[in-house]
Structures are given as C-alpha cells and as structure tokens.
Amino acid sequence: MMITVAEINLSLRITWHVHTVNDLSDGKILLVHCKSKDDDLGIHNLTAGFEFSWKFKQQILGATLFWCYMAYDNFHASFDVFWVTEVFLRKCNYHDCIWIARDDGIYLKNIPDQHDEYTYNWESGRLL
C-alpha cells in the first residue's frame, strides 16, 4: 500500500517513540546500538525485562530511518527499526514502535492487532 500525503503530513507532526525491549530468558544481557543517518544513540546493555527507548519527530525533507544492532551470547541481528510505510506506521499505532528481543528472534509488537510479529532472525556470531 502507498502512504498518502495526508498520512505523511500527520506522521510529521507526531512524536514517535521507538522501544527496544530485552525479553531474553535466564537473565541474559542484550547489547543494543541504534543509529540514524544523523544520530548515534550509543551502546546500551539491557538486563532482562528492561528497555532502551528514544523519541523523535520525522524529518520534513528525506525519509526518517533508524536501525539497530542487537547481540547476546553468540548471536546478533542488525535491522531497521523505523521507516515510513503505511503498513509499518499502522503496526506502531502511529506513535509507538516496540521491538522485543527473544531467544528465538526479534518481534515487532503489532499494537492495533494486539500481537507480536516475528520479524527478524538472530545470526550466529557477534560483530561488535
């Protein structure tokens, strides 16, 4: 689906929140490092049950994009956590994007449909 001009105008006025949540078992520590083209949000070590989150407003010129690297034990994943498409913005309920790290992969909380969607796999090895 294409995003409409009205939806873009609405999304530019919204303060967006992105959450990265450690839902790993056995008290495992989750390393999270998130960035955009303009901002490096630093490296965070999250204990089980904790999250790292940030908020922002979209750029007027150019598409806003954030991505994260996550790792635990001998597994890692690198993926986009915010981009502008109608389907993605709807899953975030047009203001809160919630990413959940679990032992079997990374999930995006689909807020309107009230379920977590398996979205990304862990890969073996660590890059950092």
Image: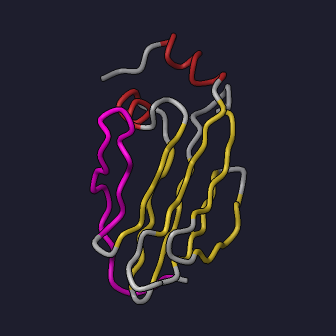
Q: Is residue 113 magenta?
A: yes
Q: Nearer the viewer, residue 9 or 62?
A: 9
Name the residue at 50% across, 75% down: 48
Name the residue at 52% across, 82% down: 29
The span shown in magenta is 105-127
Question: Horizontally, is 54 left or right of 125 in the view?
Answer: right
Q: Quadrant of the C terminus?
A: bottom right
Question: Horizontally, is 17 left or right of 97 in the view?
Answer: right
109, above or below 11, in the image:
below
Name the residue at 58% across, 74% down: 46
Name the residue at 55% across, 53% down: 19
Residue 60: x, y in percent?
Answer: 67, 25
Q: Nearer the viewer, residue 63 or 120?
A: 120
Q: Quadrant of the N terminus?
A: top left
State which quadrant residue 114 falls in: top left
Residue 45: x, y in percent?
Answer: 61, 77
124, above or below 116, in the image:
below
State which quadrant residue 112 falls in: top left
Residue 67: x, y in percent?
Answer: 53, 56
Q: Is residue 10 magenta?
A: no
Question: Horizontally, is 11 left or right of 79 in the view?
Answer: right
Magenta part, dominant SS: strand
Residue 10: x, y in percent?
Answer: 57, 17
Question: Horizontally, is 96 left or right of 3 in the view?
Answer: right
Q: Outermost residue, top direction?
A: 6
Report the number of numbered marks. 0
4, above or below 111, in the image:
above
56, above or below 59, in the image:
below
